[in-house]
Image (tube, rainbow, N blue to C red):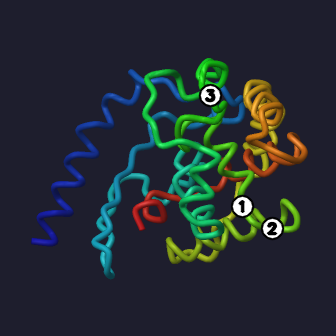
Amino acid sequence: MVCRYGDDLKMMVEQVKQYTSEGKVADYIPALSVADPSKVAVAIYDGNDTCFSEGNFNEKFTLQSISKVLTLALALMDHGEKYVFSKVGMEPTGDPFNSISKLETQIPSKPLNPMINAGALAVSSLIKGSSNEEKLERLLQFVRDLSGNDQISYNKEVAQSEFETADLNRALSYFMKQHGVLTGDVDELLDFYTKQCAIEVNCEDLAK
């Protein structure tokens, strides 16, 4: 049965690989635009000792918005549900992930949920630590513990590229600071947030 599962995964990867040329890699962050669009991988972890993987599963990539889930988990561990959701809501939105419009029309002016950029920035500001270095190390260690890979770090080139082009996220942050959702230095927050998004894993790490 295990062999059959592996054969099925290999067949699926081969089937979808032919469609990669029809897609387009992300280029809203310049450093992401150089990614190889032909790379395809899948990993399925059974929660115990077995991870079924196929394709380019050792290829590293940055977490980007997937990091929002992990940072939310750490913030909840740091502060508890009541405090975290006093800063960010639990409501869905049909707006783009980087929209500012709901911040202007909501009262109180807090992000609708942690998975849009405004909400993720608010959550990132809650991670405990006396410095960005300490906050990042705590988040990295959390990801390492979850994945079982103590070599996980972040991609400095992607983080810097994202920081330099984060004008909209800066605008979101300054708006929330004006309305008391955020405190502290906005560029300090953006420095942590862009490094958070640039945490680098492979397909097996992510499955675990």
Q: Distance between the residues labelled 3 and 2?
A: 30 Å
Name the element at disc 2: loop
Name the residue rendered at 67%, 65% in the picture. 139
Q: Given the image, on which type of amino acid does mark 3 rest?
A: Ile
Nearer to us in this view, 113 or 116: 113
Left or right: residue 72 compared with residue 109: left
Quadrant in the rendering for residue 2:
bottom left
Sort mark 1 into few (<14), some (14-19) or many (20+) by Cα contacts within 10 Å.
Answer: many
Q: Given the image, on which type of amino acid does mark 1 rest?
A: Ile
Query: Badge 3 is on which residue?
Result: 107
Question: Seen from this angle, which residue lies furthest front?
Answer: 107
CB atoms at circles 1 and 2 under 8 Å apart?
yes
Query: Badge 2 is on which residue?
Result: 129
Left or right: residue 193 compared with residue 149: right
Name the element at disc 3: loop
Q: Given the image, on which type of amino acid does mark 2 rest?
A: Gly
**Residue 168 percent across, percent down from the top left:** 74, 24
